[in-house]
Image (cartoon, helix red, strand yellow):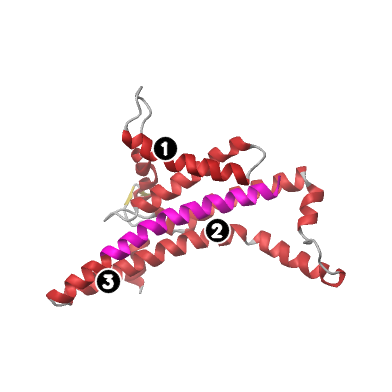
Amino acid sequence: MTNLFSIFDPSTSVLNLKTNWITILISMTILPSPFWLMNNRYFLIWKKPINIMNNELNMMIKKNKGSTLMFISLFMLIMLSNMMGLFPYIFTSTSHLVMTLTLTLPLWMSFMLFGWINNTEMMFSHLVPVGTPPMLMSFMVCIETISNIIRPVTLSVRLAANMIAGHLILTLLGNTSMSLSTNMMMIMLIIQMLLMMLEIAVAIIQSYVFAVLSALYASEVN
């Protein structure tokens, strides 16, 4: 089990620097450069999901619509990191809590500070849902407080766990397929191709879920 989970460790290092984390920056080279007078097809394909995300986030964040740029950037960063991790011998940065907590904790802290400083009464009212019986108010305050505190943990663990689970399944199937017969190896190859398609969908969906939930948390404090 130690060797199995060691595939997620950034083992390559130069001058005590974990060079595998450079894959976060390498993924940025996939972004199209808008240096041309006429947009090519690659730029148009990349622009379409960004416009879709912008329209959805604008419906969630009715105030401060310019802040959707931050969540779209998060979506692009996480999606590119997830997709880069599907290539062989490339480190998956989003499978580590160091990466996911680095994204979630500053967001959550900024939302909480903004809400409690500027909208204190509204933040207190969120602790007690409408229609709560008086006997359950103190209990509901505890539940809502705990749910607010664990939000960055749930966001980061959801992203990291989904990335680790898919990679572990692909690794286990790849290690066991070498000892199989030819017919079973063909079946295993088809299964791995289907799992790879599923992992591509999971990489996109998890980045979408991360960006949408972050936008929802931001809309609550406004």
Q: Secondary structure at mark 1?
A: helix
Looking at the picture, how far across and down is residue 55, in whole percent? 54, 41
Provide the secondary structure element on which disc 3 rests: helix
Q: Which mark is residue 47?
A: 1
Quadrant where the N terminus lies? bottom left
Q: In the rendered view of the protein, which quadrant contains the C terminus?
A: top right
Residue range corresponding to the magenta coloring: 193-222
Amino acid, disc 3: Leu
Q: Is residue 111 found inside the magenta-colored segment of the image?
A: no
Mark 1 and mark 2 in contact? Answer it, CB < 8 Å: no
Identify the residue position indicated by label 2 in the image: 155
Taking the image as shown, residue 173 lies to the left or right of residue 184, namely right
| Dot 3 or dot 2, earlier in sequence | 2
> Is 1 placed above or below 33 here?
below
What amino acid does circle 1 point to? Lys
Q: Is residue 154 left or right of residue 206?
A: right
Discs 1/3, front: 1
Q: Earlier in the sequence, mark 1 or mark 2?
A: 1
For the point 46% across and 41% down, the residue is 50
**216 within the magenta span:** yes
- Of the residues under marks 1 and 3, which one precedes in the sequence? 1
